[in-house]
Amino acid sequence: GESVTIRTPHGEPRPVRISGIVHDPGLAPGWQEQASYAYVTRETIADLGELPVLREAHVRFRPTPAETRDAEIAAVRVAGRLEGVGEIRVPSIRRHPHQGQMAAMQFVLLLLCAMLVGLSAVLTAALLASLLARQVRDIGVMKVSGAGVAQVAGIYAALVSLLGLAAWVGAAPLGWLGARALSRGLSFLINFDLTDRSVPPWVFAVQLAAGVLVPLGLAAVPILRACRLRVRDALSRQGARSEFV
């Protein structure tokens, strides 16, 4: 209902009433481009002193071409039947205009997450190796009492699994909150609205599997080395020097 004063290159400043606000996700945000976008009728263009002619023609093909190359060929054919065509733009088929940017952001985040999981797993294995170095004689006593390699290894495997489970319990809700905040910020930067911010259940299952299985896989080496020591070697071991990494 308010008015804004607009001056075109061939006209005088005139007030134009604002009839509504539109969100065009195909355009970059105006605050990024330092520009304002307006949608007006031909009559308004004429009142502003410009020729009420169309300078762009948007063409859709039915059925939709299977490949972008097919759409380009069809667009060239259409342009050959028109006059004064200066430029032809063919967007990628079935791709959002900002999909490349979104894919790059997702790849960077995935790479950082993989590095964090790997470093955390290595840290867990190193801590467990230090623990085993101090308890190697205890392992020897358990084996003298009749415990097998699988039983002793199962104790330390359960310890690593519980650590991973505890870490997942604390990290999952924080990750969920962080993901919502990050997606909200990225959608604002790329100029599109997220209609569904829910997280699929399989995402939490993958997180749990990564948080338990990755550290357990790296810790398996020091655990098996310590549990396979002969009883005599285990009981004669002195100090806390680690040889299981």
Image (cartoon, rainbow, N blue to C red):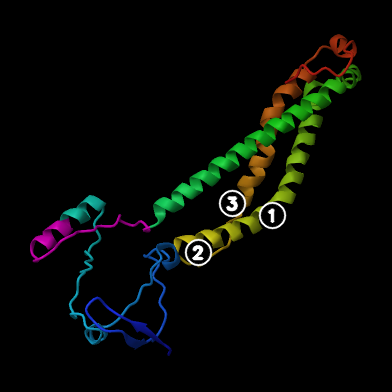
SS of the residue at dot 2?
helix
Q: For the magenta stretch, what is the residue range?
A: 74-97
Is the residue 167 above or below the residue 234 in the image? below
Please tell me whether residue 143 is drawn above or below residue 82 in the rendered image: above
Position of residue 17 measured from the top left corner of the image (x, y, whole percent):
37, 88
Q: Are marks 3 and 1 in contact (CB under 8 Å)?
A: no
Identify which residue is drawn at 65% across, 58% down: 177
Q: Residue at x 77, y 16 (%)?
A: 243
x%, y% of residue 29?
Answer: 43, 65
Decide whether residue 90 is among the magenta residues.
Answer: yes
Query: Residue 53 sits in which quadrant?
Result: bottom left
Q: Are marks 2 and 1 in contact (CB under 8 Å)?
A: no
In the drawing, what numbered circle is on residue 188? 2
The kind of residue tagged 2 is Phe
Label annotation for residue 202 = 3
Pick whichever, 109 or 244, lies toward us. 109
The N terminus - image quarter: bottom left
Query: Mark 3 or mark 1: which comes first in sequence?
Result: 1
Q: Which mark is residue 217?
A: none
| Magenta highlight: main SS | loop
Residue underneath mark 1: 174
